[in-house]
Amino acid sequence: GEDVEQSLFLSVREGDSSVINCTYTDSSSTYLYWYKQEPGAGLQLLTYIFSNMDMKQDQRLTVLLNKKDKHLSLRIADTQTGDSAIYFCADRPFGNEKLTFGTGTRLTIIP
Amino acid sequence: DTAVSQTPKYLVTQMGNDKSIKCEQNLGHDTMYWYKQDSKKFLKIMFSYNNKELIINETVPNRFSPKSPDKAHLNLHINSLELGDSAVYFCASSPRQGMGVFYGYTFGSGTRLTVV
């Protein structure tokens, strides 16, 4: 079955860039997503990328996709305290509405 | 107006009890889901309904029974609750597949179930 892996923890100084990495195994993935979960809240869609794209930029967020290596990353520029959260990547296989989520990366901001 | 709303937000109950969690979406989406998030924050899909029809049923004990009275509602009933059922349960919805770009799911804020 599909497998989506992430590092569990990342600490970054305020103002630096954060890079959260994700690897997936399903080569038929069509869309890949990044979700943010703040404490006590549900998951909020941050951005997504279609599998035929290499990069997508949206304000402070940059998504990079290496389809050959099945590697996805999320870069947050100028990280702020409000970016503290758990970040989940997820993939959607072709013809399937089910999203498979990664293990989540807890991002901690150091003042 | 909340897009995907779940009730209750918190639920504390004793082992062996039966409980229900309700979910409603006002987005006009056709597909709804239940996900379970354990204490380590791992998210696992449990069920999915498309326009009241069950389309995904992962390996979940049959003590869990989803019910979709209409496409805007998906409820989760749990019989004979066990300690291991303690988790946060998230409801989500998405538009019908094939309707342009798939924007992923819209999630509810979760129901924290604690079984004592």
Image: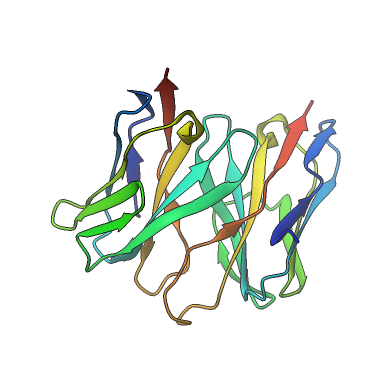
Q: Can the viewer see residue B77 in this picture?
A: no
- The residue at the point 81 percent across, 37 percent down is B11
User: Toward the viewer: B52 or B16?
Assistant: B52
Residue B75 visible to the viewer: yes
Q: Which residue lies furthest to the left in this view?
A: A68
Image coordinates of residue A30 in percent, x first then y, are: 31, 67
Q: Measured along the vertical axis of the image, is residue B106 above or below residue B54?
A: above
Location of the N terminus of chain B (image quadrant): bottom right
Q: Which quadrant, please, contains the C terminus of chain B?
A: top right
The x and y percentages for residue A77 are 32, 39
Identity of the residue drawn at 75% across and 53% down: B6
- In the foreground, A59 or B26: A59
Q: Is residue A29 above or below residue A75?
A: below
Which residue is at the front of the view, B29 or A79?
Answer: A79
Return the x and y of residue A49 as percentages of the image width and height: 32, 61
Q: Going by the picture, which residue comes out furthest to the top?
A: A111
Asked which quadrant contains residue B73, the reply is bottom right
Snapshot quadrant of residue B31: bottom right
Is residue A62 or residue A97 the one in the foreground? A62
Tell me the residue at 69%/62% (across/down): B3
Total numbered badges shown on the rendered structure: 0
Image coloring type: rainbow
Name the outermost residue toward the bottom: B99
